[in-house]
Image (cartoon, rainbow, N blue to C red):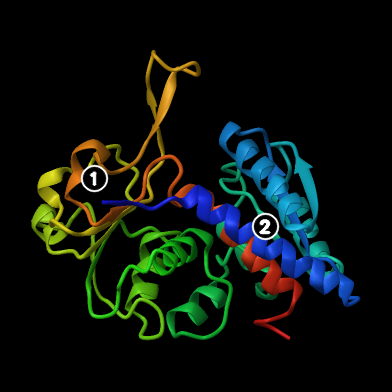
């Protein structure tokens, strides 16, 4: 069984990005600049944005953090989005989700210039991804593809089952695994209304679990020799831990791992790759690789 180490892989990629950035700067090009808008003080969002700032430093990027209190109006937030759209010094930016309930997340996402949408959530980027055109791909699916590639997991012609149909992971993951020049797999999506979920999962050569239900994928749902990618990260109460909780994936790792050809752990698997892929998207934005 191979343990797919996302933390080590992400560190390697960030070092590669930093080397590329320093070459760009030495040649007189601009250092890539990533901006982030953070609304309110949600603990998870605070941690995620802080990690993005640290990743920017590791990659040699310039970074900006723009903060708003939770009572910011949608109009004020959209005005700042438009200012970032027009700022030639900012190559890419993100608006950290979730947003307060009085703000339309979809309206904010659609207001972002798709050429600076390094999160890959704008409908233009989603549509271009679906038909295989150059674009910014959302970070978690992009990170999973990169892990499969770097660990030499054969995907062409294989049966891939994606557990979950979210717009951020499940749907784009299925599209990417289906495309001829990427996953080139035969893809099935299963979800809460799928009949015989366990039977569908057992057919998978590659099983990607992204439903946010701790320990949902059990050993009887996994084909021996399969590659299992666990996207789930849920805080589970655990009195033995200093913080009173532990992170759990969607897969019952202890019992599933012995069956697998390869598997990602939680934490340390897909998670570190997500921010790392945001950095790759920012590098592409800085180099204007996708949109001139």
Q: Is residue 227 visible?
A: yes
Nearer mark to the viewer, of 1 and 2: 1
- The span from disc 1 to disc 2 (Cα, nearest Å) is 35 Å
Mark yes or no: residue 113 visible. Answer: no
Please name the residue shown 63% across and 66% down the image.
280
Q: Which mark is residue 288?
A: none
Mark positioned earlier in the residue sequence (1 or 2) = 2
Residue 260 x %, y %: 21, 53
In this picture, residue 113 sits left or right of residue 125? right
**Whether label 1 touches label 2, CB < 8 Å:** no
Q: Position of residue 219 (x, y in %)?
A: 14, 44
Q: Using the image, tell me which numbered label, if any, was put on residue 94.
A: 2
Q: Quadrant of residue 199?
A: bottom left
Q: Position of residue 8 (x, y in %)?
A: 52, 50
Quadrant (top left, top right, bottom left, bottom right) of the C terminus: bottom right
What residue sits 27% from the left and 77% below the top? 185
Please, what secondary structure does the residue beneath circle 2 have? strand
**Near-viewer residue (54 or 106):** 54
Q: Position of residue 49 (x, y in %)?
A: 66, 44
Callout 1 environment at 10 Å: few (<14), some (14 to 19), or many (20+)? many
Horizontal relation, residue 263 to residue 292: left or right:
left
- Residue 155's place in the image compared with 16, above or below, is below
For the residue pair 85 and 263, the one nearer the viewer reads as 263
Circle 1 sits in a helix, a strand or a loop, which is it?
helix
**Total marks in image:** 2
Up the image or down, 82 lies above or below 246; here it is: below
Q: Specify whether 242 is left or right of 202.
A: right
Q: Tell which residue pokes out farthest to the right in this image.
A: 28
Q: Which residue is mark 1?
A: 257
Alpha-carbon neighbours of circle 2 within 10 Å: few (<14), some, or many (≥20)? many
Instruction: Give the residue at x 51% y 81%.
Output: 128
Q: Quadrant of residue 117?
A: bottom right
């Amino acid at each position: 069984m191979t343990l797919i180490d996302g933390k080590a892989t992400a560190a390697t990629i960030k070092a590669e990005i930093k080397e590329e950035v320093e070459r760009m700067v030495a040649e007189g090009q601009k250092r890539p600049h990533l901006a982030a808008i953070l609304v309110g003080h949600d603990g998870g969002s605070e941690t995620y944005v802080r990690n993005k700032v640290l990743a920017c430093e590791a990659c040699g990027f310039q970074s900006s953090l723009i903060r708003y209190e939770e009572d910011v109006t949608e109009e004020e937030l959209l005005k700042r989005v438009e200012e970032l759209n027009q700022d030639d010094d900012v190559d890419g930016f993100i608006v950290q989700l979730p947003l307060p309930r009085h703000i339309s997340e979809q309206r904010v996402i659609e207001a972002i210039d798709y050429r600076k949408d390094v999160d890959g959530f704008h409908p233009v980027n989603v549509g271009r991804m679906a038909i295989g055109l150059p674009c910014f791909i959302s970070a978690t699916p992009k990170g999973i593809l990169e892990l499969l590639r770097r660990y030499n997991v054969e995907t062409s012609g294989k049966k891939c089952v994606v557990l979950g149909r979210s717009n951020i992971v499940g749907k784009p993951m299925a599209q990417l695994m289906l495309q001829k020049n990427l996953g080139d797999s035969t893809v099935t999506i299963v979800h809460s209304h799928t009949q015989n979920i366990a039977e569908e999962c057992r057919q998978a050569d590659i099983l990607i679990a992204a439903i946010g239900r701790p320990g949902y994928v059990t050993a009887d749902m996994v084909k021996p020799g399969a590659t299992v990618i666990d996207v789930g990260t849920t805080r589970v109460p655990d009195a033995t831990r200093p913080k009173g909780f532990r992170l759990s994936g969607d897969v019952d790792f202890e019992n599933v791992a012995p069956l697998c050809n390869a598997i990602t752990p939680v934490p340390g698997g897909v998670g570190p790759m997500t921010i790392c892929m945001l950095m790759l998207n920012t590098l592409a934005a800085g180099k204007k690789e996708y949109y001139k």
